[in-house]
Amino acid sequence: MRAPSHNARVPAAPPSEDADETLMLRYAGGDMGAFDTLYERHELAVWRFVFRSVKVQAVADDLLQDVWFAVARSAGSYEARAKFRTWLFTLAHNRLVDHVRTAKNHTSLDTSDEDERSLADTLVADSGYGPVRQLQSREQATALIAAVEQLPQEQREAFLLQAEGDLSVQEIAETTGVHFETAKSRLRYARASLRQHLKEFA
């Protein structure tokens, strides 16, 4: 299992047409190829979510491996009651909670153009929260990254779960263990704050 480079391009989805949940059940039955497909599909999304939360590449690499080890350990008890992606990001959320409880200080790393644009490109308008304009220049992307880092932890996590994890509001609520309205409120405040920080680019 290899942690991805922070400026790597998102790989194309593998040719398998099987749903994630089917692949996880196949892996639980001993199909190692199914695990490889799941890893290829989701590794960078999980890594970016973790990295944007801890802001240190080496720590993000370690946490990513912890998450996928947790996937492997949990295979025998896995049940397809929710989307695999929701379950996967719940594991990532729980690992982050454990990390934050013990971690002290983190130092931000510089981000590359590719990494900045990756997050910027996820800022597509959500019908429930109003438009957040996609950003084009390095200056705008850098401002976006800085604004995300300034969000309160709970708002930042909710935003990143949507932006990097492509989770719905309901899935964010399930992942973080809060009510739907709480998750919706966190996203609303996060987006309002980002719009305020980026208003000079409007």
Image (spheres, rainbow, N blue to C red):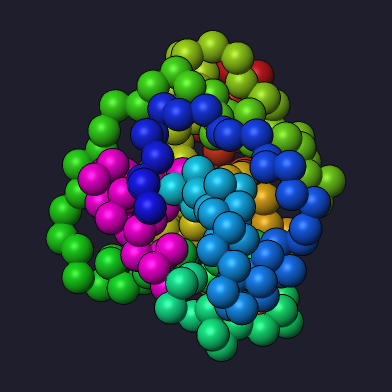
Q: Nearer the viewer, residue 114 or 158?
A: 114
Magenta segment main secondary structure: helix
Q: Nearer the viewer, residue 102 or 156?
A: 102
Is 200 displayed left or right of 21 in the figure? left
Q: Which residue ends up furthest to the bottom in the rendered image?
A: 77
Q: Vertically, is 83 above or below 140?
A: below
Q: Which residue ends up furthest to the right in the rendered image?
A: 127
Q: Residue at x 38, y 53 (%)?
A: 1
Q: Is residue 184 visible?
A: no
**Quadrant hosting residue 35:** bottom right
Q: Vertically, is 15 above or below 37?
A: above
Q: Residue at x 20, y 42 (%)?
A: 107
Query: Residue 117's spot in the image, x, y percent?
Result: 54, 24
Q: Nearer the viewer, residue 171 or 66?
A: 66
Q: Residue at x 73, y 42 (%)?
A: 15
Q: Residue at x 36, y 26 (%)?
A: 111
Q: Tell me where the magenta segment starts and ends, as one range.
A: 48-70
Q: Is residue 56 magenta?
A: yes
Q: Is residue 69 magenta?
A: yes
**Quadrant hosting residue 118:** top right
